[in-house]
Image (cartoon, coloured by chain):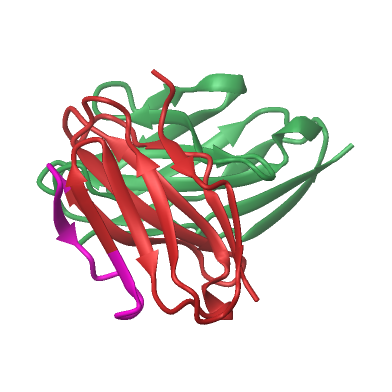
Chain colours: A green, B red
Amino acid sequence: AQSVSQHNHHVILSEAASLELGCNYSYGGTVNLFWYVQYPGQHLQLLLKYFSGDPLVKGIKGFEAEFIKSKFSFNLRKPSVQWSDTAEYFCAVGANNAGNMLTFGGGTRLMVKP
Amino acid sequence: DAGVIQSPRHEVTEMGQEVTLRCKPISGHNSLFWYRQTMMRGLELLIYFNNNVPIDDSGMPEDRFSAKMPNASFSTLKIQPSEPRDSAVYFCASTGGGPRVEAFFGQGTRLTVV
């Protein structure tokens, strides 16, 4: 079975700072990778996803993520955060041989100070 | 499509009472997930259905919890009897079209057991 680790549980940044949130997964086969965002009081929404091809994936709101297969990582980045990026971020992994099953990481709470 | 629809949005009940949460997945999606989110435990997968059949219910915490999916457009999560520690936000999500399609989440049901 696959597992997902997000090592940063809480991150506090000032506006305009750069962001990188770590995500590592444990699975030996072909995986599909996702980042979701949950704004305060809301449900999870998709930020970006990776299936194949260019390992650098661009998503909404200026976010991007890089798949590094050798490191089993899919870190999320944003060059300059805004106060409105304050949210919880979840990395998720789906394996091609696990149907539509998704495994989520524990989440990272980001607070951006104005 | 209106997305994944959950009801009720908020539920307050007394300890010992039966609680039923409802979910209508996106039309055409063949997989449905129930998640529980708390501050202490984060986002936990409770049960996963594929084509209306429960595939993985290892996350269901106790026998007090049960879930059904009588048809492709409706699922319920029942807690009987409810306890204060069941207080959480319960999310339903659906996906379809294979493992490369992201999951779509409902708005959640905030359950408070007093």
A85 lies above or below A8: above
Identify the image quadrant of the C terminus of chain A: top right
- In the image, residue B79 lies at what x, y percent? 40, 70
Kindly tell me whether residue A104 is visible in this rendering: no
Let me know if residue A9 is in the magenta part: no
**Residue A10 placement, left or right of A45:** right
Which x, y percent locates residue B49? Answer: 20, 50
Question: Does B65 lie within the magenta span?
Answer: yes
Q: Residue at x 18, y 27 (%)?
A: B97
Q: Position of residue A38 (x, y in %)?
A: 59, 42
Q: Quadrant of residue A87?
A: top right
Q: Is residue B7 above or below residue B3?
A: below
Residue nearest the viewer, comparing B42 with B53: B53
Residue A35 or residue A56, whichever sits in front: A35
In the image, taking residue B22 as reference, residue B114 lies left or right, namely right
Stretch in magenta: B50-66
Camera sees residue A30: yes
Quadrant occupied by the N terminus of chain A: bottom left
